């Protein structure tokens, strides 16, 4: 750790400073709401989400996963699973699918219908893993999001907005807030939210528009002189990346405060108008957090149920929520597939970063598991069957990858989550949500 | 013999399909709107409620009454406390897979619907 007044910059792994340690396994859980076009009857026939072939010989080209082709050997696509606990079990719950779904994705538990503070779902996969891995890092886990998630009270059908706002639950009654502002994430990773660093320190640094690295230049130079060639290269690359991320963040903040029109006027200054730019900043920050071992567990919520956001970068101009309600008509389903393809298309940016980062005797992608999915299936039907789901990475060699696994009808996604927990060493967990048995990955 | 016949008759009646229960109904509008349909059958007579969606996202509970005969259900009810009071008329059939399918007529026009029984929690 390099320290100066007002900042503390974590360092990447350096051979000179620490003996080689075992694998650091990491988990990233990404949710994109509203299921997929490929979960509809027409979408299944056209393989808009899951490939036609199961096993190792699968063709991604017609699917929304086509952008993942460079990572096919790292992929584990699990199709045809259900999230039954997102279904209604009482008359009053019928119609509340949008307000339950996010709470189910990582917990696989049925949320209690309440608009009050007595919310209840289940402990989420990321938090169970964080409880195990988080003891080894300064921050046990971090929760990030892209959309506005600070609504209070009830969101609809008697459900608290909390259920829509987060996918991470530290316990069945403790939902965790998600951070939308990349600046906050940056400051968490680089220690400037330490209790001994005052708000005045932080304001001064932001007002000066200085780099967080400026304050540690001298100590960084001293360290650089002490380490070998390989470590020096690591340090140079790391500082370059930090500067790049920080510079992008500062440019976004400068634009937001310039008085120019913003597409997201209510968003914090650190949030770019562009969905892709926002997601890439968050991925860069996750990568930096992994490099510095500040945390090993992230959850990342890409969307919010009922959002009418438009994604011009997708090449399709329709709003998200109405597009997902495609009436079962082929042309509209194909439009929704364009949005699915666009959303999945942001993931390779992160996978490439992980894959190109050496990590112990492998790559960071070998030691990480990135899961992506939704607890909703066909959003036109508001059902939770045949939900979209894939994973990338190998969790330290526990998940072989390079395969499309088509589950038997009615298989709970919770079975897959249970196996993920086992892959992260939580072999003592016997059941999770509505799991019936571990799913062989 | 009378006892045997009575038992047989009871068994036949018990095997008769019934629509009693809570149904997760999908109203086929621009998209499928999940709607709660709660029914109680007594002989041929059926009573119940439907939580009709409104334009402002709220639900209005409408009381229904009608009958279920030979696999076909007919129900009607008055929409009260709405901007435009109107009558709902529902028709449907119970299919072999245990789901209901039919049409609902209101002042908005006629919509298709399907319904399946609420699942029980595992």
Image (cartoon, rainbow, N blue to C red):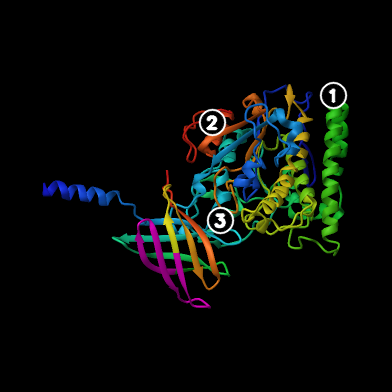
Dot 3: chain letter: A
Image location (x, y in percent) of residue B40: 34, 60
Check disc 1 and report the residue beneath it: A230
Magenta stretch: includes residue B89: yes
The foreground one among A237 and A284 is A284
Of mark 2 and mark 1, the one earlier in the sequence is: 1
Q: Quadrant of the C terminus of chain A?
A: top right
Check disc 3 and report the residue beneath it: A99
Image location (x, y in percent) of residue A7: 78, 44
Task: Report the mark closest to the observer, 1 or 3.
Answer: 3
Image location (x, y in percent) of residue B75: 40, 66
Q: Residues within 10 Å of mark 1 (few under 14, many from 20)?
A: few
State whether the magenta stretch is mostly helix, strand or loop.
Answer: strand
Q: Residues within 10 Å of mark 3 (few under 14, many from 20)?
A: many
Magenta residues, as a range?
B62-90
Residue found at x 64% / y 45% = A43
Image location (x, y in percent) of residue A419: 55, 31
Magenta stretch: includes residue A429: no
Of mark 1 and mark 3, the one earlier in the sequence is: 3
For mark 3, give the secondary structure. helix
Q: Do tag 1 and tag 3 residues touch (Cβ < 8 Å)?
A: no
Dot 2: chain letter: A
């Amino acid at each position: 750790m390099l320290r100066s007044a007002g900042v503390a910059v974590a360092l990447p792994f350096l051979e000179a400073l620490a003996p080689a340690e075992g694998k650091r396994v990491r988990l990233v859980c990404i949710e994109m709401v509203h299921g997929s076009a490929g979960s509809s009857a027409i979408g299944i026939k056209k393989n808009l989400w899951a490939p036609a072939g199961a096993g190792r010989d699968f063709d991604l080209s017609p699917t929304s996963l086509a952008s993942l082709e460079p990572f096919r050997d790292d992929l584990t696509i699990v199709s045809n699973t259900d999230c039954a606990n997102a279904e209604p079990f009482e008359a009053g719950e019928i119609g509340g699918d949008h307000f339950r779904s996010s709470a189910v994705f990582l917990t696989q538990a049925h949320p209690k219908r309440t608009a009050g503070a007595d919310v209840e779902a289940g402990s989420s996969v990321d938090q169970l893993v964080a409880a195990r891995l988080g003891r080894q890092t300064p921050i046990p886990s971090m929760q990030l999001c892209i959309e506005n998630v600070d609504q209070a009270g009830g969101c609809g059908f008697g459900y608290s907005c909390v259920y829509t706002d987060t996918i991470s639950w530290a316990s069945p009654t403790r939902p965790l807030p998600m951070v939308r502002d990349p600046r906050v994430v940056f400051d968490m990773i680089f220690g400037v939210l330490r209790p001994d660093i005052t708000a005045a320190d932080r304001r001064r640094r932001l007002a000066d528009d200085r780099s967080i690295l400026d304050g540690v230049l001298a100590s960084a130079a001293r360290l650089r002189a002490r380490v070998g060639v390989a470590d020096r290269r690591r340090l140079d690359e790391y500082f370059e990346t930090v500067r790049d991320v920080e510079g992008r963040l500062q440019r976004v903040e400068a634009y937001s405060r310039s008085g120019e029109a913003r597409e997201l006027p209510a968003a914090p200054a650190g949030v770019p108008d562009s969905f892709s730019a926002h997601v890439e900043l968050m991925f860069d920050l996750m990568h930096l957090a992994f490099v510095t071992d500040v945390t090993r567990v992230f959850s990342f919520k890409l969307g919010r149920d009922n959002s009418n956001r438009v994604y011009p970068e997708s090449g399709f101009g329709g709003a998200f929520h109405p597009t997902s309600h495609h009436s079962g008509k082929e042309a509209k389903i194909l439009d929704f597939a364009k949005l699915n393809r666009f959303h999945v298309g942001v993931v390779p940016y992160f996978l490439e970063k992980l894959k190109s980062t050496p990590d112990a005797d492998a790559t960071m992608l070998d030691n990480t598991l990135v899961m992506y999915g939704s607890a909703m299936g066909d959003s036109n039907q508001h059902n939770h069957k045949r939900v979209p789901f894939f994973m990338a990475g190998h969790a330290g060699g526990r998940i072989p990858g390079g395969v499309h696994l088509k589950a038997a009808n009615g298989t709970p996604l919770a079975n897959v989550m249970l196996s993920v927990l086992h892959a992260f060493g939580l072999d003592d967990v016997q059941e999770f949500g509505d799991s019936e048995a571990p799913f062989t990955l | 013999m009378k006892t045997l016949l009575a038992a047989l008759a009871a068994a036949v009646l018990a095997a008769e399909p019934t629509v009693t229960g809570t149904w997760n109904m999908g109203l086929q509008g621009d998209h499928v709107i999940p709607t709660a349909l709660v029914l109680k059958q007594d002989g041929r007579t059926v009573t119940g409620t439907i939580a009709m969606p409104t334009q402002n996202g709220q639900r209005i509970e409408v009381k229904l009454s009608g009958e279920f005969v030979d696999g076909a259900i007919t129900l009607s009810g008055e929409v009260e406390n709405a901007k435009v009071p109107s009558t709902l008329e529902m028709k449907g059939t119970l299919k072999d897979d245990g789901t209901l399918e039919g049409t609902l007529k209101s002042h908005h026009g006629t919509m298709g619907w399907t319904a399946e029984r609420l699942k029980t929690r595992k």
